[in-house]
Image (cartoon, rainbow, N blue to C red):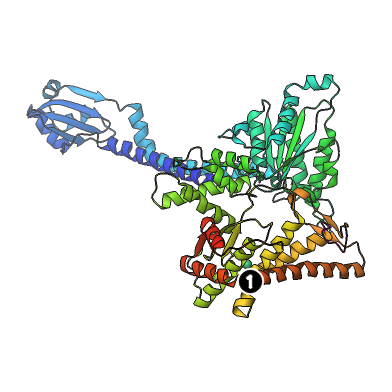
Amino acid sequence: MNQNTKKILKSVIAVALIFIALILIFSSFSSLEPQSKQMTLNDLATQISAGNVTNIVVQNNTITATLKDGSTATATKEPETGLIETLKNYGVTPDALAKVPFQIKEQSGFEFWMSLLLPTLIPVILIGVFFWLTFRQAKQGATQAFSFGKSNIKLFGAFKDRVTFADVAGLKEAKQELLEVVDFLRNPKKYLDLGAKIPRGVLLLGMPGTGKTLLARAVAGEAEVPFFHISASEFVEMFVGVGASRTRDAFATAKRAAPSILFIDEIDAIGRERGAGVGGGHDEREQTLNQILVEMDGFDKEAQVIVLAATNRPDILDPALLRPGRFDRRVVLDLPDINDREAILKIHSRNKPLAAAVDFRQIAVRTPGFSGAELENLVNEAAILAARNGQKEILQDDLYQSIEKVMLGPERRSRALSKHEREVTAYHEAGHALVIASVKHADPVHKISIIARGQAGGYTLKLPLEDTHLRTRKEFIADLAVAFGGYATEEIVFKDLTTGASNDLSVASDIARKMVVRYGMSEKMGPITFGKTQELVFLGKEISTEKNYSESTAVEIDHEVEHFVRRAYDTAKKVIQKNRKALDFIADTLLKKETIEKNEFDAIIKKFAIKPIEA
Ligand code: ADP
Ligand code: MG
Ligand code: ZN
């Protein structure tokens, strides 16, 4: 239910309550008169004459007589004539009248007006309330429609859960850099006195989930200056032409509060290179971007507003944004290393019950390449798993199982495989594992499984012993051979091929091509890179490649790629043929148990005395 519906519902309930209350009041008035029997004026006259009446109360046209026996009776007189006169007309003697005390009771003003107005008032009130509600709605709508040029910029203090640097694991350099920025704002004089220019913009760069937004929030928590926050996608909404005015408004707000920090999240939503869009670009976005540039240039030297921005697509950012005087400081957020991973896991399990035996180091060891967001997800999955099993605390095993879930997607045990398909899968994975164990420089086997997960029918996990930042030629060659492990096995064992190896093939082709054109790892082509590739190294993503070599070179490149691929394929084939017994044994074990863990696999390798060879 959204906010508005809630509000309306509340008003409706309020109106209904008022209505019920009014009805109650009204009905209590009508029941105020005591229950008494009716009599005619004639009867009353008779009773008075007989001396039976002890008291008479007159209210408006109603006469209430108290009789000797204590009972009361009411009569109604004609409105225009006085009571005494009327009674006299009915033959009551003045004597008899004098004996009876008369009370003339004025109806109280409130009662009078209530009885008069209530029946008409209720509908009027109801209609009034109805109109008021409608008008209020309409007014809201109107103000919304007229304020779309205003940014819905938020002051960060409003965030309920304050985040500080203590909640951010690792990212030491990034924190350092940002602390400096905060210090600029706190003590500008210190820096200005030394002739230092206050930085304008700081761009946080990093893959999704590396903690850019988190870090910005932590800066907000640490900064003792106002911190404004806006997501770039909010600049560009519904109406065309709003982006620029919203930008102006956001910057104006931040300037008014100076010294302050303005944080623009996901800036790539507007900061895309101008004119780069398909079909002539996106005018709205370009205008917004231009406005940002204008605003950033418009800060005078003393203006103490620092613009923080975050993006995971620095490659597509307009170069104008990166010019000095704009986002001239760039802070790169790397994927966490093993220590950071351990710290992140600890942070996110702070308020979860953990078994005493939980060792986050072991989890960190097995999660190279995981981002902070993935690690957070891992801990959460482990908690869900523990809850589903009815445990009171999270066990190490829950964490282990969650690694694969986060990495490869949930298990799909229900996927029905024919007997033959299961066999092919078991041999395919056994083939990968066997090649891993048989060539030097391949990361060790961590687990083999033929339970389908995500897209994969089965999987062989290999994990590096430690985080590495550089990859060697020998490792690539080993990886290539491993990739062909499944394919070669299918061919040798079943004399047939399946579509299950297609991903392996594309991975292999990709590695081989990069070795040739990018890393200069082919002896024949030499230490040259081919093709101008737009990418940022830390993102490891290729955006576009421009061909800057001749057709004949292209042919040579293809030959070299093929050479690497063939060599890997031959290695894989050789390994499988030589160790057929071990292969059969691993596949059999997989068919029986579905998964083989590292220890068990190591034992098998030992049993068959497999010695790794140079790939
Ligand atoms: P993005 O870089 O995509 O903006 P976020 O800042 O949204 O990533 O991070 C997603 C989540 O991952 C955060 O909410 C946080 O819980 C977790 N996370 C990422 N990096 C870290 C870190 N260094 N320390 C602690 N938690 C982290
Ligand atoms: Mg983010
Ligand atoms: Zn495979």
Q: Quadrant of residue 455?
A: bottom right
Left or right of residue 534, residue 118 in this image: left
Q: Nearer the viewer, residue 67 or 223?
A: 223
Q: Residue at x 62, y 40 (%)?
A: 339
Left or right of residue 598, residue 151 in this image: right
Q: Residue at x 68, y 32 (%)?
A: 227
* Image quadrant occupied by the C terminus: bottom right
Q: Nearer the viewer, residue 527 or 243?
A: 527
Residue 359 in sight from this viewpoint? yes
Check the image and report above or below for 194 versus 267.
Answer: above
> How many numbered markers are drawn?
1
Left or right of residue 285, residue 531 in this image: right
Q: Residue at x 54, y 42 (%)?
A: 360
Q: Main secondary structure of the magenta part?
A: loop
User: Within 8 Å: ligand 3 and the Cβ of disc 1?
Assistant: no
Q: Residue furthest bottom?
A: 495
Query: Residue 432, position in %: x, y?
Result: 62, 65
Is-magenta flag for residue 525? yes
Q: Quick one: label 1, few (<14), some, or many (20+) residues within 10 Å? A: few
Left or right of residue 92, residue 458 in this image: right
Q: Quadrant of residue 499?
A: bottom right
Give the residue type at disc 1.
Lys
Q: Residue under label 1, please give it.
A: 578
Is-magenta flag for residue 436? no
Q: Which residues are magenta?
A: 518-526
Residue 134 in sight from this viewpoint? no
Query: Residue 396, position in %: x, y?
Result: 48, 47
Ligand 2 is found in which quarter of the picture? top right
Query: Residue 79, position in %: x, y?
Result: 28, 34
Q: Nearer the viewer, residue 315 or 428?
A: 428
